[in-house]
Image: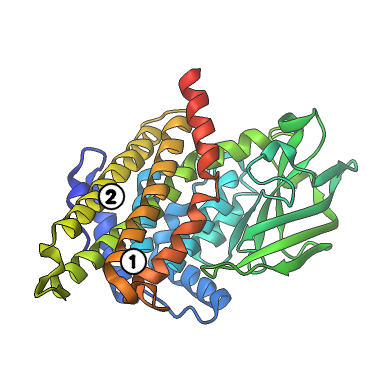
Amino acid sequence: MADQSFLNWPFFEDKHRALHAELEAWASANLPVDHSDVDQACKDLVAALGKAGFLQYSGAKQGETLDVRCLCLIRETLARHDGLADFAFAMQGLGTGALSLFGTPDQQAWLDKTRAGEALSAFALSEPKSGSDVANIELSAEDKGNHYVLNGEKTWISNGGIANVYTVFARTGEAPGAKGLSAFVVPTDSEGLEIAERLDVIAPHPLARLKFNNVHVPKTGMIGEAGAGFKIAMSVLDVFRSTVGAAALGFARRALDETLTRAKSRELFGAPLAELQMVQGHIADMALDVDAAALLIYRAAWTKDMGAARVTREAAMAKLYATDKAQEVIDKAVQIHGGDGVRKGSIVESLYREIRALRIYEGASDVQKIVIARQALA
């Protein structure tokens, strides 16, 4: 069992501690799942998380508020038990984040389905020529009077190929660069929307490249105002970036737990590994990095929940530190496990593959440094 003393920190209320206890019990009984068919596993996980009520925290309709601390606690706990479960939950939130924050009541009808686990959602932002550089988006949305026509590509889209609805960012051209983007809600059965390619990565998740071939979207499908797409995308990332750090924290906590078990049970030179000072030094570094990451993550989440309009600096710090340090913690875990640490199918080997993408998506580590520096200089 991972250390739970952090739940007594002043960032949390009784409702957060109750949620953690409920989810921990559910996860212990239901995770991990079989990953042999990733698409089906994600669908089953979404259905199960919806039935258990945990997806209610993934979105917010008008009059409701996203509780970022709940989002972070859920992602941390699920990631500690099963990386694919964390992925399934996270995409229900990120995919509908724009609808939660800016959607009309009609658009937010999708939340009834995604929060119940009856529909899967996706966030279609990245393109072949624009990942971290959102202002460089090329997918076009041409105004045809009573509808828009979308043409272009998106890539590295999580839940691509299995989602029921996509939040799509496209260039409507009100101004050059970031000021000429808009956001749209696009059902997966829209004519002209094509799954061009499924993408395989080191930790298998459903990813795809999408093609938009004259996809018609009604005017009612625009989220927010024309030209507000960049603001919407950044607002969504402002909320969910801290949760990426929380997922990394879950991976790191599991790596530390596995390391403590290994160090106490494995003998070297006639004594447990835990008695070696060098191993103790590694464990101390791991424990320090876990706690420091948790402090940054829950500071960012608490600040947002307390009403801050933006937490750009806090969220960037949380994501950067938590993901980079989780990579180091897991690497130490692999080293202490020796040959078993690189054996395919072992827990720490799986964590080693799972953590790497988190340092790239929703703003790569180097981009987070730019964000933090700009915030400090301002």
Residue 314, quarter of the rendered image: top left
Q: Position of residue 360 (x, y in %)?
A: 54, 50
Q: Position of residue 133 (x, y in %)?
A: 67, 39
**Local SS, label 1:** helix
Q: How many marks?
A: 2
- The amino acid pointed to by label 2 is Val
Note whether residue 50 is visible. Answer: no
Q: Specify which label sits upstream in the sequence, 1 or 2.
A: 2
Left or right: 43 with respect to 281? right
Q: Position of residue 119 (x, y in %)?
A: 58, 65
Left or right: 324 with respect to 291? right
Q: Which mark is residue 334?
A: 1
Color scheme of the displayed model:
rainbow
Which of these two is toward me, 260 or 249? 260
Q: Residues within 10 Å of mark 1 (few under 14, many from 20)?
A: many
Left or right: 241 with respect to 10? right
**Local SS, label 2:** helix
Above or below for 165 versus 97: below
Q: What residue would you read off at disc 2?
A: 290
> Looking at the image, which residue sits at the far front?
269
Residue 173, quarter of the rendered image: top right
Residue 154, quarter of the rendered image: bottom right
Q: Determine the residue positioned at 58% across, 37% down.
A: 234
User: Depth-wise, is mark 1 or mark 2 nearer the camera?
Assistant: 1
